[in-house]
Amino acid sequence: MGEILIEFANVLIAIAMLVVSIACFYAGRCSVAKDEAKTAKDEAREYGRQRGNMETTLSHMNESFKQLDGKFDKMDEKFDKLDAKVDGELRELRKEMKVEHEKLAKRLDDHICNDHGGMRL
């Protein structure tokens, strides 16, 4: 009967070791799954933070581009006004130059006729 008890004890020890092994495997697996879930959650949080930063940066860039676009429009208007002003001033200068040229031509013609007895041009 002693041998049966020893065999029975050996079987119980083997079963107990099997149960402990399964429990350890399950506990380890649960721990790994928990760590993976935490890592995935952290990565998702980081992705969300980076996406938020990127959206904020894009928003600021869009605002800056709108401001620059407005400045370019104002500069374009100023250049158009300046261009019109310069064109007007050039027309006036051309008129003045034509009048001065005609005066100079008349003086030269008078000088030639009066002082040198030449014919008028």
Image (cartoon, rainbow, N blue to C red):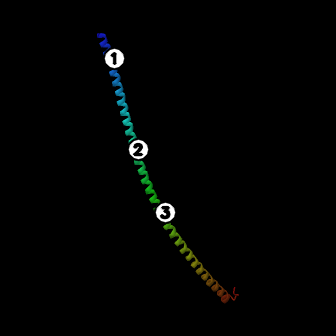
Q: Is residue 81 left or right of residue 29?
A: right
Q: Which circle, 2 or 3, is nearer the viewer?
A: 2
SS for dot 1: helix
Q: Amino acid at mark 1?
A: Val
How much space separates mark 1 and mark 3, taking CA atoms? 85 Å
Q: Is residue 62 left or right of residue 120?
A: left
Please give the name of the residue rendered at 32% of the width and 13% of the height, measured from the top-left corner: 7
Please give the name of the residue rendered at 41% of the width and 51% of the height, measured from the top-left corner: 53
Ranked by sequence position, the earlier of labels 2 and 3 is: 2
Residue closer to the observer: 59 or 14: 14
Q: Which residue is mark 3?
A: 69
Residue 46 x, y percent position in the rendering = 40, 45
SS for dot 2: helix
Q: Which circle, 1 or 3, is nearer the viewer?
A: 1
Q: Is residue 116 left or right of residue 89?
A: right
Q: Which residue is mark 1?
A: 11
How much space separates mark 1 and mark 2, taking CA atoms? 49 Å
Q: Amino acid at mark 3?
A: Asp
Q: Quadrant of residue 113?
A: bottom right
Q: Quadrant of residue 12?
A: top left
Please give the name of the residue rendered at 40% of the width and 42% of the height, measured from the top-left corner: 43
Query: Can you say which quadrant of the picture contains the C terminus?
Result: bottom right
Q: Residues within 10 Å of mark 3 (few under 14, many from 20)?
A: few
Residue 44 x, y percent position in the rendering = 41, 44
Ranked by sequence position, the earlier of labels 1 and 3 is: 1
Query: Can you say which quadrant of the picture contains the N terminus?
Result: top left
Residue 49, compared with residue 114, is above or below; it is above
SS for dot 3: helix
Residue 64 x, y percent position in the rendering = 45, 59
Mark 2–mark 3 CB contact (< 8 Å): no
Q: Which residue is mark 2?
A: 44
Please give the name of the residue rendered at 36% of the width and 33% of the height, measured from the top-left corner: 30
